[in-house]
Image (cartoon, helix red, strand yellow):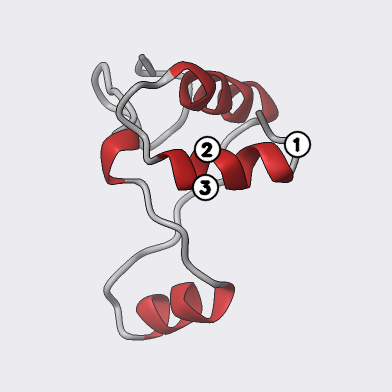
Amino acid sequence: MLRPGEHPFIKHETVVNYRDARCVVLEQLRSLHANGDIHLRESVSPQIMEKILAGASVCRTMKLRLKHILRQQRLI
């Protein structure tokens, strides 16, 4: 659970949607941004990133393939 004040974009209690997480290459993100399909926001703090990754490590709905990638990268 992320709460207001933890990041400027968060206005109400928010959960991370691990179920719909996807793995994309940087060029795909750049293309989506250039087309206006996604917008850049302020970076999350290291503390918030730790919280998000901790949630990913125990999440039961995230695709196992994505968890495997996070483990390979030593993020979880």
| Residue 50 marker | none
Task: From the image, tell me which residue sits under label 3.
Answer: 42
Residue situated furthest right in the rendering: 74
Q: Is disc 2 in contact with disc 3, using a CB cutoff of under 8 Å?
A: no
Instruction: Please report whichever mark, 1 or 2, sits nearer to the chain's N-terminal start.
Output: 2
> Quick one: SS at disc 3?
loop
Would you call the spot at circle 2 few (<14 residues within 10 Å), some (14-19), or many (20 or more)? some
Task: From the image, tell me which residue sits under label 2.
Answer: 67
Q: Is residue 54 above or below residue 16?
A: above
Q: CA distance from mark 3 to mark 1?
A: 24 Å
**Horizontal relation, residue 46 to residue 37: left or right:** right
> Quick one: SS at disc 2?
helix
| Residue 74 marker | 1
The amino acid at mark 1 is: Arg
| Residue 38 image position (x, y, % from top left) | 33, 67
Q: Nearer the viewer, mark 2 or mark 3?
A: 2
Q: Residue at x 63, y 23 (%)?
A: 50
